[in-house]
Amino acid sequence: MAPVDLDLAQVRAFVAAAEHLHFRRAAESLSLTQQGLSKRVARLEEALGTRLLDRDRSGVRLTPAGARFLTPARAALDAGAAAVEAVRQGGRPTRLDVWGHLYAPLRTVREALDAAAGLHVEVGPGRDLPGVAAALARGEVGAGFGRFHTFGESLDEGLAHRLVRLEPVDAVIASDHPLAAEPELRPARLSALRLILPAAAGRLDFLGRFAEQFDVPVLPGEANLGLDHLLDQVRTTPDGFTLLPSELPLAPGRGLTVVPLTDPTPLYAWSLVWRRDRPDPAVPALLHAFATTGRTRRWLEYDPARDWLPEADATEALAG
């Protein structure tokens, strides 16, 4: 079969139409006329030899071929943007602020950046999602990395984000508790314990939704004094436990046991976040770096029959 040289302008028109499922809105998002966008999609379909979109009076729908093409089409756009950025960026580093420090976000950031060539990124600490959102709005940082969720402020509306990793979490329990002897646990069995929060509940969206979903009582936290302090609380609280990422290394000999959670396995969602109206030029290259590493490490695997995510995260994960 003869190779097809993709025209990225045509691919961009298709992706916009697939995301909006409406040609007029898709055309407006690209500052094109509706006729111009339609022509680009038609030329792409002609080059590929198949229909990607069905259009009728009821709207626009992806064909099976279009659904298969959408994810690699987005990757092609990210790769193209990364190539342009590699030329334009020069020596100026992009500031990437991370939050969720208890769950060690730098583990994921480091893997993605190590696999990327030509990216000049300066990583800094953010207090939390609202704090990073405020820094993005002021233009002080180019992107953020952590768990994204709506937080009910005007800053929320100015953010764009993309899921880049889903990480299983385990239960950490005092070693002398009977449940610590189990090879694995269902989250529902944790309702006999109390979930120890490492900080004030309002800053811990994931843990709050986990407790609500599995009817687990919580032991509220106050100031976040770090991982060692949290683990000491778990060790000295007879009915206490906490949740930590499966790949987070814990030093042995602390009187604690890590027990995997299954049926379902809770997943912690990590996202790249940027300013919607004026994205930093490095954002496409960052997205490409996370996507490339994520495919190798299978970071975005999600099976609703096997795994659990908060509802908003699950919707995004299924959307691909």
Image (cartoon, grey):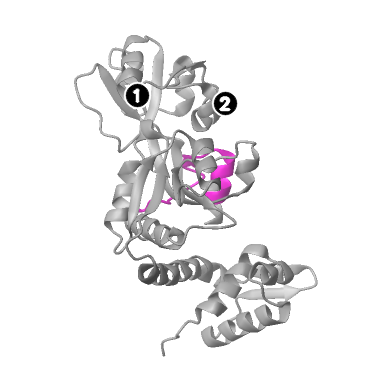
Tell me which residue sits at (55%, 45%) in the image: 314
Pinpoint residue 199: horizontal percent, then vertical percent: 46, 22
Q: In which quarter of the image is the N terminus?
A: bottom left
Tell me which residue sits at (52%, 17%) in the image: 217
Pinpoint residue 38: horizontal percent, then vertical percent: 67, 80
Q: Is residue 87 visible?
A: yes
Badge 2 or badge 1: first in the primary sequence: 2
Tell me which residue sits at (31%, 15%) in the image: 232
Are there few (<14), some (14-19), or many (20+) residues within 10 Å of tag 2? Answer: few
Give the labeled residue for mark 1.
226
Residue 82 figure quarter: bottom left
The magenta stretch is 297-317
> Taking 136 as reference, is 308 above or below it?
above
Residue depth check, mark 2 versus mark 1: number of the one nearer the observer = 1
Give the Cα distance between marks 2 and 1. 24 Å
Give the labeled residue for mark 2.
212
Q: Check disc 1 and report its element: helix, strand or loop.
A: loop
Determine if the magenta segment contains residue 249.
no
Amino acid tagged 1: Gly
- Judged left or right of residue 199, residue 112 is left
Numbered circle sitting on residue 316: none
